[in-house]
Image (cartoon, grey):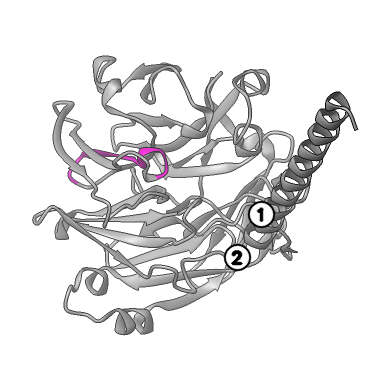
């Protein structure tokens, strides 16, 4: 064999071995993807005849950028985050005034945000913004603004113990009387969902119920959202949180979970309570739809987004679920919700299937995106 043929044979062998290695790695990656996020059963429907027709939906705001979460003050001030999965290049926290978005608290402060998502207005008229720090790759942060002066009054930078790399601090509630912030860690990448309880006086947070059966996802496949065909589906843990009117109970639920749970704020803030005892004090409340955000009205009826049926449901005090509205073709992913004054319930359509892992061109093409409101038969407390 001459030198030229020998070289050609060696090159072909190297290419063949490289192809085998690549194929093996690809199969391994597919296997890992399937084992971690693949499969899943279809969730049985819980919907009833809707209480409201789709004509009851009012568009409050429409934009080229998809909204994340919303909160509304007692005076009707409306605040939104732009969903971080859209990778917005503009303002990320805005106030909606006369149908237009204004950077909050101002344009200069926007550089302090990285990936803000959760928002909340407490009973002391403080506006809270939760930034998950791009899945904990950067430091997650929590900001609080006094709405009377629009000034920053509190800032917490989470350490790696509180919000490790791979965490996704998503939603929050503030028990104002106890100076406690309760946060859901969705943990998309790390897959270790938990509740994070921040003591404002001590400026320290603890991770609770991590990977508990009540905070982690069950094996349900969200029919409205699969990745890479049906190779993978979202497996989303604890997300929506809401406090009852007395701020005694915290209601919470994982997105891919059949149940809604509750636990007392007192138990969550009791640092002497052993983790196993805390788990035993969590109460099962009800079946629920695959849901994202939660809210609650003044009768302590829990409002749940129903992501598979493009709308909202309500759980009454007797444990009966009622569909409030279904809007296929209008609502793509009912995300965050908040009561405002005059009995209005506001909710965002983040259109998550059209923005997550999508190009900027695709996101722009699929716009506009909407903030809706619905006049409810039972009012709620603004901000909640």
Image quadrant assignment for residue 382: top left
Query: Of marks 1 and 2, which one's residue comes earlier in the chain?
Result: 1
Which residue is at a point 67% across and 62% down the rendered structure image? 35
Q: Which residue sits at x=43%, y=63%?
A: 252
Instruction: In this rendered view, identify the residue nearer to me: 346 or 86.
Output: 86
Q: Secondary structure at mark 1?
A: helix
Instruction: Give the residue number, with chain letter if any, for mark 1.
Output: 33
Residue sitting at x 49%, y 31%: 67
Residue closest to the eye, 198 or 335? 198
Residue 139 placed where, x, y %?
A: 29, 41
For the residue carrying disc 2, how many other residues have a C-alpha within 10 Å: few (<14), some (14-19), or many (20+)?
many
Q: Name the mark on residue 69.
A: none
| Disc 1 + disc 2, Cβ < 8 Å | no
Report whether 204 appears left or right of 186.
left
Residue 126 among those drawn in magenta? yes
Q: Is residue 236 above or below residue 340?
A: below
User: What is the magenta range?
Assistant: 124-135
Number of marks present in the image shown = 2
Q: CA distance from mark 1 to mark 2?
A: 34 Å
Tell me: 105 left or right of 284. left
Residue 273, compared with residue 24, is above or below; it is below
Tell me, for residue 321, which label it has, or none. 2
Q: Is residue 130 visible?
A: yes
Query: Is residue 236 depicted above or below 15 in this figure?
Result: below
Q: Secondary structure at mark 2?
A: strand
Question: Percent from the top left, x then y, of residue 171?
Answer: 39, 49
Q: As drawn, which residue projects farthest toward the left?
A: 201
Q: Is residue 90 magenta?
A: no
């Amino acid at each position: 064999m001459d030198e030229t043929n020998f070289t050609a044979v060696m090159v072909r062998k190297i290419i063949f071995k490289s192809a085998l290695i690549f194929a093996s790695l690809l199969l391994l990656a597919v296997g890992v993807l399937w084992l971690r996020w693949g499969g899943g059963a279809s969730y049985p429907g819980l919907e009833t005849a809707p209480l409201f027709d789709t004509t009851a939906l009012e568009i409050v705001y429409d934009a080229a950028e998809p909204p994340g979460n919303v909160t509304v003050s007692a005076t009707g001030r409306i605040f939104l985050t732009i969903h971080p999965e859209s990778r917005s290049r503009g303002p990320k926290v805005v106030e909606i005034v006369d149908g237009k978005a204004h950077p909050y608290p101002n344009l200069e402060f926007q550089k302090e945000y990285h990936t803000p998502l959760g928002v909340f207005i407490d009973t002391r008229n403080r506006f809270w913004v939760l930034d998950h720090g791009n899945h904990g790759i950067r430091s997650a942060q929590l900001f609080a603004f006094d709405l009377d002066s629009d000034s920053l009054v509190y800032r917490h930078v989470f350490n790696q113990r509180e919000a490790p790399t791979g965490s996704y601090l998503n939603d929050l509630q503030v028990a104002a009387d106890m100076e406690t912030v309760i946060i859901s860690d969705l943990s998309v990448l790390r897959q270790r969902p938990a509740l994070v309880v921040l003591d404002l006086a001590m400026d320290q947070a603890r991770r609770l119920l991590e990977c508990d059966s009540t905070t982690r996802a069950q094996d349900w496949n969200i029919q409205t959202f699969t990745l890479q065909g049906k190779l993978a589906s979202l497996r989303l843990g604890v997300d929506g949180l809401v406090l009852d009117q007395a701020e005694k109970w915290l209601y919470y639920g994982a997105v891919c979970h059949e149940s809604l749970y509750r636990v007392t704020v007192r138990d969550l803030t009791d640092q002497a309570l052993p983790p196993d005892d805390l788990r035993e004090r969590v109460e099962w409340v009800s079946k629920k739809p695959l849901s994202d955000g939660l809210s609650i009205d003044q009768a302590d009826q829990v409002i749940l987004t129903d992501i598979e049926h493009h709308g909202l449901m309500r759980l009454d005090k007797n444990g009966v679920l009622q569909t409030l509205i279904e809007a296929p073709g209008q609502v793509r992913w009912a995300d965050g919700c908040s009561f405002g004054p005059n009995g209005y319930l506001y909710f965002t359509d983040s259109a998550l299937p059209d923005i997550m892992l999508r190009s900027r061109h695709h996101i722009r093409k699929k716009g506009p995106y909407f903030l809706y409101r619905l006049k409810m038969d039972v009012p709620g407390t603004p901000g909640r």
